[in-house]
Image (cartoon, coloured by chain):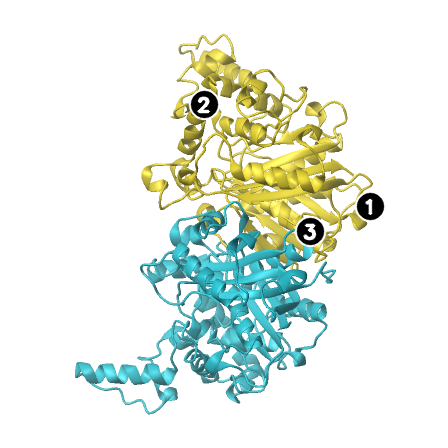
Chain colours: A yellow, B cyan
Amino acid sequence: MSGKLGRPVCLVGAGMSKFGAFPDKDSRDLFVEAFQDLRGSVDKGLDPGEIEAVYLGNFSSDLFEHQGHLAPILADWVGLTPRAALRLEDACASGGVTLRQAVLAVAAGAYEVVLAAGVERMTALPTEAVTDTLATAGDVLYEFPAGFTFPGFYAAMATAYAARYGMPYEALWEVARKNHLHASRNDKAQFPMTIREIMDRRIAKAREKGGPVPGWKDEREFLRDPGANPPVAWPLRLFDCSPITDGAAAVLVVAEEVARRFTDRPVRVLGTGQASDACLYGREDLTSLRAAREAAAQAYTAAGVKPSRIRLAEVHDCFTIAEVLAIEDLGFFPPGQGWRATVDGATRWDGPLPVNTSGGLKAKGHPVGASGVAQAVELWKQLRGEAGARQVPGDPDVALAHNVGGTGQTCVVHILGRG
Amino acid sequence: MSGKLGRPVCLVGAGMSKFGAFPDKDSRDLFVEAFQDLRGSVDKGLDPGEIEAVYLGNFSSDLFEHQGHLAPILADWVGLTPRAALRLEDACASGGVTLRQAVLAVAAGAYEVVLAAGVERMTALPTEAVTDTLATAGDVLYEFPAGFTFPGFYAAMATAYAARYGMPYEALWEVARKNHLHASRNDKAQFPMTIREIMDRRIAKAREKGGPVPGWKDEREFLRDPGANPPVAWPLRLFDCSPITDGAAAVLVVAEEVARRFTDRPVRVLGTGQASDACLYGREDLTSLRAAREAAAQAYTAAGVKPSRIRLAEVHDCFTIAEVLAIEDLGFFPPGQGWRATVDGATRWDGPLPVNTSGGLKAKGHPVGASGVAQAVELWKQLRGEAGARQVPGDPDVALAHNVGGTGQTCVVHILGRG
């Protein structure tokens, strides 16, 4: 919190695996896929021998794959033995924490070139076991025995927010519609399709089968139909929830003084912040995440910028309500106004403040340990003008990533800028 | 590996819980106990509000307690919300990795005051489940299905070493005898007693019960008796293995420029190193750990000292053979000579190079995520002349900690000096 880092740090490469459900891939396969993608992204090429350490974000390979001590295995899998390899964990913020610690290690002078990666293989377990595993990111003494799993946690936040600010629950669907629109332009996304496309597919499938054909006229009717969009934990429905995902992501973190060895267009780490909070049961307010506000304040101070300077953001939309809280906690919109800004299209890729152009956790997918790193991958592309059909117009030069662990016991914020 | 850190870093406090088997204590209780002990160790007092971040080493609260995302919970448990809190994991090296990352974060300028802690609650599970959980620190695809758990891994190293260097297996018991001797002077140890005392207790118990009284004349006879010291994985027997332990440890890591706020006698971090290796099945040599040699080389270079400058060391004796490999890998003794030096008493607390004066993992106990931090706690005491009955004579000024993860896929080495 002393803030000023020892030396400036850049990203000079970024890659990710395809996100999705892959019964034949384990963490090693996913990691290798992300690593290869990263290698291809380094403009002047990357000799793996230049990598001095591997920082790995992973929530629970222990419970998902019954494999601990994953970092050195993955380092070895891509030929990086005997480089230091370590795992960092703060639930769904593991990726952001990993990026941050890699940045600090380079700033400290310990390393010049660090691979910061995240991975999670989730779909090998049955859905109920995944839900129980994810619930270990809450408090297993005081919350889990009371029946809380993650949809329930965020449902509590949604009801508190709606009660306080008069938000109609259907407003949350606009988060999902927007993020699916973005994902439809991201071929690495788990669901690279709009909700309209999902609806049309279901209609086509019903036709094929010769059964009754649903009469949805538009996406809103589709989302209102409890058959198509069933409640998961009231008021949250299926399309309010991010999916269960296998995936990996990686960025190459280097000291600015060596960045030009790799690229003439590095992305700078302008600021980073991290904070913690009590578990949900111990909080006074459910309509905002204190850890997010604190982490954001640290990152803004370090970067010397205000929220109004941010041109686009990747935020932690594990549930639709989480994105609404995020864009308020980050200072983009006043408390209680995030849902309205979303409904108004302010956060669409072509709006004034594009949010989750990658498709977000909602539609790109949410392999929990990888998500924070994947946010940086998206910002890397956008800041370099390489985001293709979803490229934010106007040549964005400052961007923010917001990664939450659990119900907000952890939040990490990074601010990145064109180098 | 660029080596020179941004600014010098010190330890200004150190504490630990009692190590042992505590059915009524979970990770939170153990952590609080270590934190309170640390607070008492800070000469000029510690206002917890001065702590800016919590770095937590933990191997697998996921599998041991079905609790993930432990770091912010523990931070909250001692009133440190909203400070950044994160968990680091590299199996049994989690504690050493945690200390190292805390040092780097301070060196980077991100923080001035960081709490680096480690915790593991292990005894709540049945022993077989603990063995299986620990086995996740190996390779669960290629090693576990072949029947390998940790006693087997280290048994393979012991047979390879004995075959190569002509070591009689009974020489390994000298590691255990020495470390129990040391632990008999450490009231925080799980087994604060010599092997002789253990033997005498058993004899006394047999007498009490009125059954046949064992006729052991000395510790060697006791250790030779397969009834008293049964094989676990040949050639390793019960007294070659560290126990299953609940415990926590913590140190306060600060920038040197603020150290005097806390004490006039800080302990300096002179050097730190970390390296990785393939899993055991993929190695060419089982008689030395490459990660240990690499990490040690980094730490020696950073500290600007040679092995001969080290006055005492805490090394990772998860099994007796591991200590023999350690004292060779660290350059204290030539390859093949470590066992002989041990037999000769060179590593006893009053010998020329005291090793594991705390009792080591063998007798102090091995709560895996805490062990690396507990090593630093012991060195802190020794360097400050506060180790009581086990204080190394001659006013030691430079000491080393060696913490291994898995079968050596990770090793972290720290060199500490009197401030």
Pick whichever, A390 or A110, lies toward us: A110
At horizontal 37% and vertical 56% (from top left) the residue drawn is B26
Label 3: which secondary element: strand
The three-letter code of the residue at mark 3 reads Val
- The answer to whether residue B77 is above or below residue B241 is above
Label 1: which secondary element: loop
Circles 2, 3 touching at the beta carbon (< 8 Å)? no
Labels 2 and 1 positioned on one and the same chain: yes
- Percent position of residue A51, x then y: 71, 53
Precedes in sequence: disc 1 or disc 3 = 3
Q: Is residue A332 left or right of residue B18?
A: right
The three-letter code of the residue at mark 1 reads Arg
Mark 1, Cα crowd under 10 Å, few <14 / some 14-19 / many 20+, is some
Q: Which residue is mark 2?
A: A164
* Chain of the residue that carries numbered disc 1 in the rendered image: A
Give the distance between the C-alpha atoms of the residues marked 2 and 3, in whole angstroms.
Answer: 45 Å
Can you say which quadrant of the picture contains the C terminus of chain A? top right
Q: Which residue is mark 1?
A: A260
